[in-house]
Amino acid sequence: MTWLDGWWAYVFIAIAGWLATDVWRWLGVLAGERLREESEALNWVRAVATALVAAVIAKLVLYPTGVLAQSPLWLRLGAVVLGAIAFFLARQKPAIGIATAIATLAAGLWWLGF
């Protein structure tokens, strides 16, 4: 059996994936044009988005999978702390914070022999 035999499954996945996400994106664009920058609704959306990102990061640090699960907790926490410090010292540039955290984690794993 080749992928051509089941091509309809790929089309279904593409359409279902598009419908599940793209409709909400367009609704967000339409609703976002009517929101004021300092509105309570937009503040709530920002708070929820920030909380979701923080939860994902906490899950990755505290309950990792794969090779990261073999690394010590102090190294993962140290990478997050150094990344946060770099983020604020670089005038809140996310790329600097992320790069610092990744470099710290990579250097720590190398030093530990992973």
Image (cartoon, rainbow, N blue to C red):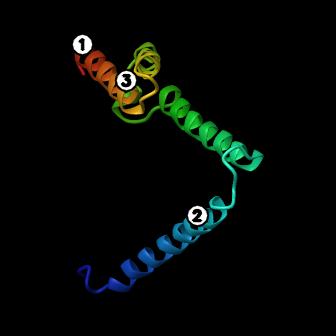
Which residue bears the numbered disc 3? 101
Calculate the distance from the C-alpha at mark 3 to the C-alpha at mark 1. 15 Å
Q: Is residue 76 left or right of residue 47?
A: left
| Residue type at numbered disc 3 | Ala
Calculate the distance from the C-alpha at mark 3 to the C-alpha at mark 2. 33 Å
Q: Residue at x 48, y 27 (%)?
A: 61
* Pair 2/1: label in front: 2
- How packed mark 3 is, by other alpha carbons closer than 10 Å (few <14, some 14-19, many 20 or more), is many
| Residue type at numbered disc 2 | Val
From what the image shows, is residue 81 above or below residue 48? above
Q: Is residue 37 left or right of residue 15?
A: right
Q: Quadrant of residue 108?
A: top left
Calculate the distance from the C-alpha at mark 2 to the C-alpha at mark 1. 47 Å
N-terminal-most mark, 2 or 1: 2
x and y, in percent, of residue 24 in the image = 59, 66
Which residue bears the numbered disc 2? 29
Q: Nearer the viewer, residue 45 or 11?
A: 45
Which residue bears the numbered disc 1? 111
From what the image shows, is residue 109 above or below residue 45? above
* Pair 3/1: label in front: 3
Q: Residue at x 36, y 32 (%)?
A: 95
Query: Mark on residue 90?
Result: none
Q: Residue at x 28, y 86 (%)?
A: 5
x and y, in percent, of residue 49 in the image = 61, 43
Are the residues at dot 3 and dot 2 in contact (C-beta closer than 8 Å)? no
| Residue type at numbered disc 1 | Trp
Give the structural element (helix, strand or loop) at label 1. helix
x and y, in percent, of residue 107 in the image = 26, 18
